[in-house]
Amino acid sequence: MANISIHPPLKGEWKFLRPPGHHLYAFDFVQMDGKRKLSHNSNKLRFYISRIASNRFFCWNKPVFAPIDGKVIRVGNGWKDHEYTNIWKTIQLWYNATYKFKPKEENGRLDIRPNAGNYVMIQAKEGYIVFLAHLRNQSILVTEGEQVRQGQAIGMLGNSGNSTMPHLHINLFDQMDNPFKAEVLPFVFSSYETLDSDGLWVEAKSSIPKAGMFVRFHA
């Protein structure tokens, strides 16, 4: 399945990331301060010597939108958000995700919430599935079987699952009938802006930003 184009799942300015260990087409979004230096309004030393509350991060509880028209095929809710982050919690989450995470089956379905947190999966008429993860607990606004429209609010950004700070994760799967055999698909965003080296916003279409770039999405 080639040339999949989806609408951005967020609005406003974000930093576009692909952390180590992520698939080539699995991405994260965080928001930064006015100087584009910090992702929270706390002293950065608190990450190493104390803790930073999740609600101090700029992207905490920001709305997330459906990137496509489609059917909600899976919703994971009820998973508690991490109330804070620090260096020790980050190491613990990495260790658990790498060495301990084994999804349990509940009612014939794998429970991926320990890793994905609260999530929504939307299937397009073409068959591919958009996966949006780490949403805030009890913020999800859609239900399984519901038809959603592109741009419809589906929940709020949180810090649930294997998440070292509030952020949104997105990727596409080819199917979910057998999650163990699901493949991550390449895709592009229909339109957005990137911040160039001169501090100017440049329009981009049908592409993916480079990791670490600042992007801006419009309604």
Image (cartoon, rainbow, N blue to C red):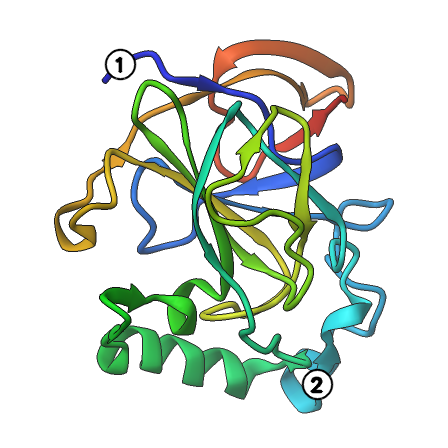
Q: Which mark is residue 159?
A: none
Q: Position of residue 83 (x, y in %)?
A: 68, 81
Q: Nearer the viewer, residue 132 or 211?
A: 132
Q: Secondary structure at mark 2?
A: loop
Residue at 64 percent of width and 84 percent of height: 48
Disc 1: CA contacts within 10 A as few (<14), some (14-19) or many (>=20) = few
Q: Quadrant of residue 45?
A: bottom right
Q: Quadrant of the N terminus?
A: top left
Q: Nearer the viewer, residue 196 or 122?
A: 122
Disc 2: CA contacts within 10 A as few (<14), some (14-19) or many (>=20) = some
Three-letter code for the amino acid on which mark 1 is drawn: Ala
Q: Position of residue 109 (x, y in %)?
A: 26, 64
Instruction: Left or right? Give the position of 96 relative to 75.
Output: left
Q: Quadrant of residue 202?
A: top right
Q: Could you tell me how far apart the alpha carbons at marks 2 and 1 are, in whole angstroms?
A: 43 Å
Residue at 12 percent of width and 48 percent of height: 181
In this rendering, the answer to whether 88 lies above or below 19 is below
Q: Position of residue 165 (x, y in %)?
A: 61, 67
In this rendering, the answer to whether 134 lies above or below 92 is above
Q: Secondary structure at mark 1?
A: loop
Earlier residue among tags 2 and 1: 1
Q: Quadrant of the C terminus?
A: top right
Q: Which mark is residue 2?
A: 1
Q: Which residue is mark 2?
A: 51
Residue at 43 percent of width and 79 percent of height: 93
Q: Position of residue 68 (x, y in %)?
A: 52, 24
Q: Nearer the viewer, residue 38 or 113?
A: 113
Three-letter code for the amino acid on which mark 2 is drawn: Arg
